[in-house]
Image (cartoon, rainbow, N blue to C red):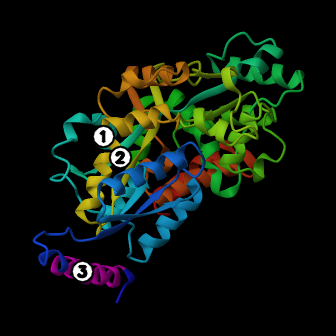
């Protein structure tokens, strides 16, 4: 007997006992229900927010017990993958949709929840909903949708004589040299083997700028990443890599260390998603980050590229619902993502999310988050995270290949060939 079935049996017995006891006093007790929640907010303020939200729900639903597991991004992905492979999917878990979710759907490891969310679906951003939608069925709900951009330290820019964030790739390369000339680390990066997705962001955004929407869509659909525009993206990224712009020890750094390096004021830039507003602070030694020196800008344009200024690279976060999750898990998910008080807390606690509840845009007052929200609103094309919109094996191949480029082990052309070989199953 599996642990889940053992637990269900115990709960059923407890429920029968409770009903028998309740029957003696003329009332009907609700059956006790227990489910798991896997989340990635492993640092404050996000960790406290999630715990408080879980506690508030359980206080209002005394028959429900939520077992909360919080792990760092990479560790959480590994745990979810292990449990999926064992055929014991978690009840509610952090998801980015895309190819990974599609595989979980095909394996019967997640459940559609369309009927259960009919009362809230129209209140949620359609693009956000699409992240957890496979073949027209909804397998989860979103809580965050944003855009990757260039976070920069205004004070360090001023010290280097840089008056504004770079608008073009050539300007970014010139700014990197200006910062180096002043003895300032230009960019913080995480290039540890399991964290090369942070480097992938650079290549992916350059690809989006150079290849444009048609080029990106064609590569993802066909599995052929050898088009000249992807080689050019690698060549542009190598221009940056050759300037040696990253902090000492970056090849052993994980995501949290990248955020902390920037949040400690030791690097002038980093390319990250909307969560960085919170993460650079929570990972800093002071836990407050660089304060008013924090700025955000769109990714630079590349001269001659097919992409538009309104094309963005980014994505969001959702919670998917495991195959065996009880209906109470979906009810909690609706509470977490669409309850107005909870959504307001997402924003006010400074967790670094841009909620997907329609109308929540008015809650955003931070100027950097407002700029990201505007970019999201103005986007004519949104390229999702490449390691999520593709299948897990292709996504891993992309991250590994970019890690090879950063380490000097692969050329820009070899990067595209390595990805294509995996995508084509060669």
Q: Which mark is residue 336?
A: 2
Q: CA distance from mark 2 to mark 3?
A: 26 Å
Q: Position of residue 40 (x, y in %)?
A: 52, 53
Report the side of 238 relative to 358 (left or right): right
Q: Is residue 163 above or below residue 121?
A: above
Label 2 SS: helix
Residue 224 seen:
no
- Magenta segment's dominant SS is helix
Q: Is residue 136 above or below residue 346?
A: below
Q: Examine the structure image and report whether residue 385 is included in the region drawn in magenta.
A: no
Label 1 SS: loop
- Earlier sequence position, callout 2 versus callout 3: 3
Q: Which mark is residue 339?
A: 1
Q: CA distance from mark 2 to mark 1?
A: 6 Å
Foreground mark, 2 or 3, reads 3
Q: CA distance from mark 1 to mark 3?
A: 30 Å
Q: Which residue has dot 3 on it? A: 12
Q: Position of residue 99 (x, y in %)?
A: 39, 54
- Earlier sequence position, callout 1 versus callout 3: 3
Magenta-tinted stretch? 4-20
Report the side of 112 relative to 75 (left or right): left
Q: Position of residue 349 (x, y in %)?
A: 51, 35
Of residues 254 and 392, the one nearer the viewer is 254
**Residue at the image position 49 percent from the left and 71 percent from the top:** 82
**Residue at the image position 48 percent from the left and 31 percent from the top:** 348
Say how many tags the image has: 3
Do the numbered discs 2 and 1 sit on residues whose CB atoms are within 8 Å?
yes
Label 3 SS: helix
């Amino acid at each position: 007997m599996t642990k889940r079935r053992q637990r269900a049996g115990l709960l059923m017995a407890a429920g029968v006992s409770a009903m028998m006891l309740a029957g003696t006093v003329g009332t009907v007790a609700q059956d006790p229900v227990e489910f798991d929640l896997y989340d990635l907010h492993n640092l404050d303020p996000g960790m406290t927010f999630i715990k408080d939200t879980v506690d508030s729900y359980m206080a209002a639903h005394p028959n429900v017990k939520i077992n909360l597991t919080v792990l760092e991004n990479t560790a959480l992905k590994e745990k979810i993958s292990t449990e999926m492979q064992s055929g014991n999917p978690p009840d509610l878990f952090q998801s980015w949709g895309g190819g990974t979710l599609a595989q979980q759907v095909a394996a019967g490891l997640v459940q559609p929840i369309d009927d259960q969310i009919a009362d809230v679906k129209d209140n949620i951003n359609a693009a956000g909903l699409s992240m957890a939608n496979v073949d027209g069925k909804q397998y989860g709900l979103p809580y965050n949708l944003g855009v990757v951009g260039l976070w920069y330290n205004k004070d360090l820019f001023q010290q280097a004589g840089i008056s504004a964030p770079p608008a073009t790739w050539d300007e970014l390369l010139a700014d990197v040299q200006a910062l180096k000339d002043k003895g300032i680390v230009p960019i913080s990066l995480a290039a540890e083997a399991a964290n090369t997705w942070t480097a992938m962001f650079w290549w992916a955004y350059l690809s989006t700028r150079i290849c444009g929407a048609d080029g990106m869509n064609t590569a993802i659909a066909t599995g052929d990443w050898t088009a000249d525009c992807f080689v050019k993206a690698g060549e542009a990224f190598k221009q940056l890599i050759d300037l040696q712009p990253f902090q000492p020890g970056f090849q052993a750094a994980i995501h949290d260390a990248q955020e902390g390096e920037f949040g400690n004021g030791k690097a002038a830039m980093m390319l990250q998603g909307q969560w960085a507003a919170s993460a650079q602070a929570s990972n800093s030694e002071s836990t407050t980050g660089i304060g008013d020196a924090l700025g955000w800008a769109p990714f630079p344009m590349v001269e001659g590229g097919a992409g538009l200024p309104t094309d963005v690279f980014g994505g969001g976060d959702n919670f998917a619902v495991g195959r065996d999750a009880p209906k109470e898990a979906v009810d909690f998910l609706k509470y977490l993502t669409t309850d107005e008080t909870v959504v307001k807390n997402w924003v006010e606690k400074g967790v670094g999310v841009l909620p997907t509840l329609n109308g929540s845009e008015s809650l955003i007052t931070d100027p950097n988050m407002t700029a990201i929200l505007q970019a999201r609103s103005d986007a004519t094309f949104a390229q999702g995270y490449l390691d999520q919109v593709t299948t897990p094996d292709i996504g891993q191949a992309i991250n590994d290949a970019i890690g090879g480029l950063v380490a000097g082990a692969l050329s820009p052309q070899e990067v595209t060939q390595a990805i294509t070989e995996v995508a084509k199953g060669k």
